[in-house]
Image (cartoon, rainbow, N blue to C red):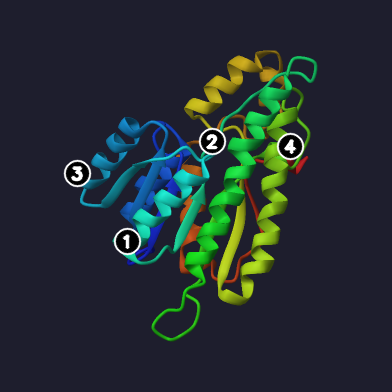
Amino acid sequence: MARLEGKVALVTGGASVPGLGSTTAVRFAQEGARVYLTDRDLDGAEKVAAGIRASGGHAVALHQDVTSEADWDRVMAAIDEAEGRLDVLVNNAGIAVLGMMDTVSTADWQRQIDVNLTSVFQGARRAMAMMRRAGDDGKARGGSIINISSVAGLIGVPGCASYAASKGGVRLLTKVVALEGASDGIRCNSVHPGMIATNIQGVALEDNAANYDATMALIPMGYMGAPDDIANMNLFLASDEARYITGAEMVVDGGMTAR
């Protein structure tokens, strides 16, 4: 299939393997997208991009610190120069600074907010500007912005104060972007992964080991999801199949938040 044929997509946080960003980039390329993936780890991102190209897809890796406005400007300018458009943005880059309230410093809190929330604002506002440009028909091109939140942005999870605050912020920021972009054909949705087997999840479990068993017991399906489960949701939201979906919360959690 070619569900994203002709679309230009940017995926942040694309170096980690297994990771949501790298898996999404691969999935998008399989469906015909011209993919740009960014990360602070340029070597890691380039390995993912090289794998995509080796499989016949189009992928370009770029260095980016998503907390840097200058980096956002540089990345968007590079895509604009090469493609002249942006159809899909996946704000995926994120970190997990976990710990009980009395162990999390103000610096830890601020770093979490900067990476997980402020970067989404910075990316969305730039993507909206590109997506509002007129196409051949004189109308705004539109596009799809996909913000990766978490089940921790929907429910309380012990040991996740700063993480939950950042992801809850992403949830509501998404709805504002959806409302402000709707008249220009810009859709914006949040994706809320549950327990997914990625590198960042491994780190999170180490930092929050005391609550691991209790958290796993909350998953009715009894096991962690795979990165492909999130990549496939991102693919749907990026595609024209989701053309009437905006401002929505797409939960992929094995039933964790159904209780």
Disc 1 is placed on an element classified as helix
Q: Residue at x 73, y 19 (%)?
A: 104
Task: Find residue 166 and report its horizontal and vertical position in percent.
Answer: 69, 38
Q: Nearer the viewer, mark 2 or mark 3?
A: 3
Compared with residue 15, is residue 105 higher up or lower down, i.e. above or below? above
Disc 3 is placed on an element classified as helix
Do the residues bearing badges 1 and 4 touch, measured as CB atoms within 8 Å?
A: no
Disc 2 is placed on an element classified as loop
Q: Which residue is mark 2?
A: 225
The numbered mark at residue 133 is none
- The residue carrying pointer 4 sits among few (fewer than 14), some (14 to 19) or many (20 or more) residues within 10 Å by Cα, namely many
* Left or right relative to 157: residue 95: left
Towards the viewer: 27 or 16: 16
Q: Earlier in the sequence, mark 1 or mark 3?
A: 3
Task: Find residue 54 and report its horizontal and vertical position in percent.
Answer: 19, 44
Towards the viewer: 47 or 218: 47
Towards the viewer: 166 or 33: 166
The numbered mark at residue 54 is 3
Q: Which residue is mark 1?
A: 81
Towards the viewer: 142 or 53: 142
Q: Which residue is mark 4?
A: 165
Dividing the picture into quadrants, the one containing residue 162 is top right
Q: Nearer the viewer, mark 1 or mark 4?
A: 1
Q: Earlier in the sequence, mark 1 or mark 2?
A: 1
Q: CA distance from mark 1 to mark 2?
A: 37 Å
Q: Nearer the viewer, mark 4 or mark 3?
A: 4
Q: CA distance from mark 1 to mark 3?
A: 24 Å
Quarter in which the N terminus is drawn: bottom left
